[in-house]
Image (cartoon, grey):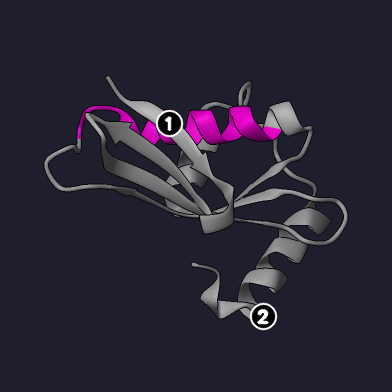
Amino acid sequence: MVEFKDERKAGRLLAVEDGSAVGFIAYFVLTGDPHALVAVHTVVEPGHEGRGIAGELVKTFYGIAAAEGVPVVPLCPYAASWAAKHPDQAPEPAPEVVSAAKAQLDAETGLW
């Protein structure tokens, strides 16, 4: 069974199975107002693809953001594709939040 663990300080939402990470979303928290969670990269480790882990990671990521009352900016192509297919679970962020997220990513290249 895959469990999800938010390692906020490391900027990772991990998918963990049998004590090992089998996938993750690399992300950062938008520092300005409004705050947002910004998905930068989704990875599923070799040998674990095709099991729906990436989709569950993104779904969980949106759930965390919803619980915190902040939007998600899906800069990761996979997360953006998932969001487009699940608009009921993935509200579109405001354009100014997307712009702020892109600016922060460009300014802090070491974010991920």
Look at the image and tell me in which quarter the N terminus lies: top left
Residue at 15% across, 47% down? 46
Percent across and percent down for residue 33 are: 88, 55
Helix, strand or loop at mark 1: strand
Helix, strand or loop at mark 2: helix
**Quarter of image, res 89:** top right
Label 1 amino acid? Phe
Q: Decide which of 33, 13 is in the foreground and name it.
A: 13
Q: Is residue 7 above or below residue 84?
A: below
**Quarter of image, res 27:** bottom right
Residue labelled with disc 2: 107
- Dot 1 or dot 2: first in sequence order is 1
Q: Residues within 10 Å of mark 2 (few under 14, many from 20)?
A: few
What's drawn in magenta, residue-wise?
Answer: 50-65
Left or right of residue 38, residue 4 in this image: left
Query: In this view of the protein, can residue 75 be seen by the observer?
Result: no
Residue labelled with disc 1: 4
Q: Main secondary structure of the magenta part?
A: helix
Residue at 70% across, 62% down? 101
Percent across and percent down for residue 94 are: 80, 47
Query: In this view of the protein, can residue 57 be seen by the observer?
Result: yes
Label 2 amino acid? Ala
Q: Residues within 10 Å of mark 1 (few under 14, many from 20)?
A: some
Left or right of residue 9, residue 104 in this image: right
Mark 1 vs mark 2, CA separation in Å: 29 Å
Residue 53 inside the magenta-drawn segment: yes
Residue at 22% across, 27% down? 51
Residue at 62% across, 32% down? 64
